Amino acid sequence: MGNVVMINISPKWEATYPGAALGILSMRKARSVEKAPALDAKRVSLEEKIRDRYQSLDRQQILESTEMAAYATYYKRFKKTYHLLLQLESVAKKNKAIPQINPLVQAVFMAEMNSFLLTAGHDLNQVISPIKLEIADGSEIYTSMRGEKLICKSGDMAMTDSQGVICSIIRGQDQRTMITNNTENVFYVVYVPPGIPGEAVENHLTDLAENVKLISPQAQLDYQHIYVA
């Protein structure tokens, strides 16, 4: 395993998306478990909060009242709709539950649904330095979590390690470094387009770390940092 703390930031990223940010959180001894009652209790509370706040709002009102507007702008340039907006509507308006999946992944999704900041979760042991945040040129190919071939969108933010792309905003995460039931150390990355205050990123990382602690109380903070373009 390489030292994932050292993230090389592409000057092209800073030039392409001034005001954007990248949040990093790595935690060790964060072992997955089959059941996490404390996390599940927080999930139920979060669902209630979402429905109370957003059930009566239409899509435009939701965008105007959340951090999602910045993501909507980013996704629009790739002719896509921000998927967390659709998931929020599913929970708020269709009374769907937040998926109960691998707790270390569910921790990410819950933090996302609380702040709407896009976050990827990786197995820290599978990420091999050097780690780079780059702007894709559209030629990068990697394997999705489902085993499908992905081709990066030109102009999209992409994270790579020595073996290739591990995530891009539009295409999603890779299979090689995905969190599994055997994961013990986690590496979370928050991709933040321009227009979102740094305090929101800090609060999101704190919430995510708290979620991990609810799963694995012995988990230890390894590294936390926010890069700003």
Image: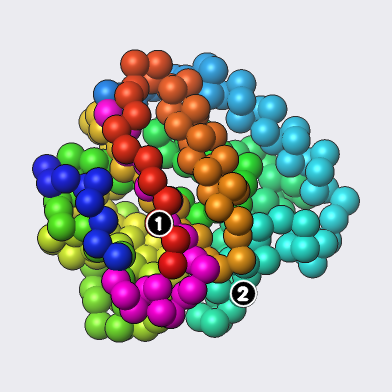
> Is the N terminus in the top left, top right, bottom left or bottom right quadrant?
top left
Question: Badge 1 local density, few (<14 within 10 Å), some, or many (20+)?
Answer: few
Q: Residue at x 27, y 24 (%)?
A: 29
**Residue 106's spot in the image, x, y percent?**
48, 37
Q: Is residue 227 magenta?
A: no
145 horizontally vs 57: left or right: left
Q: Which mark is residue 148?
A: none
Left or right: 157, with 58 as reference point: left
Q: Earlier in the sequence, mark 1 or mark 2?
A: 2
Q: Is residue 34 visible?
A: yes
- Residue 23 painted magenta: yes
Q: Residue drawn at (78%, 41%), measured in percent from left and top?
A: 51
Question: In the rendered picture of this protein, how many numbered marks are placed on residues?
Answer: 2
**Where's residue 96, x and y in %?**
67, 42
Q: Which stretch is magenta? A: 10-28
Q: Residue at x 52, y 17 (%)?
A: 37
Q: Look at 32% across and 38% down and name the residue there.
A: 223
- The residue beneath circle 1 is 227
Q: Amino acid at mark 1?
A: Tyr
Residues 143 and 160: in front is 160
Residue 131 in picture, x, y percent from top left: 21, 58
Name above or below for residue 20 compared with residue 199: below
Counting from the top left corner in percent of width and height, residue 122 is at 30, 45
> Which amino acid type is shown beneath numbered disc 2?
Thr
Q: Identify the image quadrant of residue 142.
A: bottom left
Instruction: State the residue position of label 2.
Output: 73
